Image (spheres, rainbow, N blue to C red):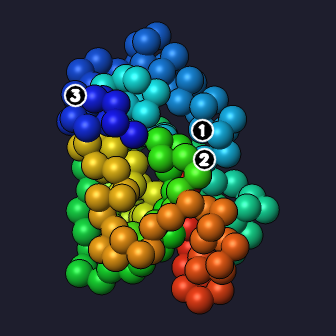
């Protein structure tokens, strides 16, 4: 948090299916895996391009969450499908050790391309929609704390867990992207 790449707007990818884009995608998936994340945006690893990766297989950390296919999304666009918002706990690899309660659209349509230039378009809801919105925010210089409406619902993971704010009184899904 505080690095200039995380504060600005990432540049569109102009060429697909290149060795450089393939290496970036591999590096992003490796980083996401090592950090036990469900999503990552290129600016988080120092690359100012509009590339995100995300996905979640069955995972003990998220036992009640439906799997999300491992996805590369280049030059993503997002469209809310309705006005319904839901609150959920979010964390971020760029804001380590902290969580906050963030409102996001419940249902969205996203579109973009994979690293080879093939078109991707999906309609999703719930946790999947939350992860995609979080990662696309990174491409626009927005970190999740900027979306928190009540700063009393933002703190260190350890404190939130110790005081059971996160797990019992609000019982909301979380993401760590």
Which residue is at the far top?
Answer: 19
Going from N to C along the chain, the mark reached first, 2 or 3, is 3
Which quarter shows the N terminus?
Answer: top left
The residue under label 2 is 37
- Provide residue 139's location: percent of width, then percent of height: 29, 40
- Res. 145 visible in picture: yes
Quadrant of residue 9 in the image?
Answer: top left
Q: Which residue is found at the position 65% from the left and 78% from the top?
A: 163
Quadrant of residue 29 in the image?
Answer: top right
Label 1 crowd (10 A; few <14 / some 14-19 / many >=20): many
- Provide residue 12's location: percent of width, then percent of height: 23, 29
Going from N to C along the chain, the mark reached first, 1 or 3, is 3
Distance between the Cα atoms at labels 2 and 3?
Answer: 23 Å
- Provide residue 84's location: percent of width, then percent of height: 30, 83
Tell me the element at label 3: loop
Residue 32, numbered circle: 1
Distance between the Cα atoms at labels 1 and 3?
Answer: 21 Å
The residue under label 3 is 11
Going from N to C along the chain, the mark reached first, 1 or 2, is 1
Q: Which residue is found at the position 26% from the left and 42% from the top?
A: 141
* Camera-side mark, 2 or 3: 2
Residue 89 to residue 114: above or below: below
Q: Which residue is found at the position 36% from the left and 58% from the top?
A: 145
Q: Nearer the viewer, residue 116 or 98?
A: 98
Q: State yes or no: discs 1 and 2 in contact (Cβ < 8 Å).
A: yes
Residue 78 to residue 17: above or below: below
Q: Which residue is found at the position 56% from the left and 60% from the top?
A: 156
- Provide residue 89's location: percent of width, then percent of height: 51, 69
Q: Nearer the viewer, residue 142 or 133?
A: 142
Label 3 crowd (10 A; few <14 / some 14-19 / many >=20): some
């Amino acid at each position: 948090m505080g690095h200039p790449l995380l504060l600005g707007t990432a540049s569109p990818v102009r060429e697909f299916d290149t060795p450089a884009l393939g290496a970036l995608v591999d590096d992003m998936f490796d980083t996401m895996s090592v950090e036990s994340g469900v999503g990552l945006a290129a600016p988080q690893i120092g690359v100012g391009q509009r590339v995100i990766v995300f996905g979640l297989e069955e995972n003990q950390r998220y036992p009640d969450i439906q799997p999300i296919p491992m996805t590369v999304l280049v030059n993503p666009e997002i469209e809310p499908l309705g006005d319904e918002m839901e609150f959920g706990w979010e964390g971020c690899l760029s804001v380590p050790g902290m969580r906050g309660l963030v409102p996001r659209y419940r249902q969205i349509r996203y579109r973009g391309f994979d690293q080879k230039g093939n078109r991707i378009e999906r309609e999703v809801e719930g946790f999947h929609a939350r992860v995609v919105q979080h990662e696309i925010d990174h491409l626009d210089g927005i970190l999740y704390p900027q979306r928190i409406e009540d700063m009393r619902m933002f703190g260190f993971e350890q404190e939130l867990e110790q005081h059971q704010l996160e797990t019992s009184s609000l019982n909301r899904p979380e993401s760590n992207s």
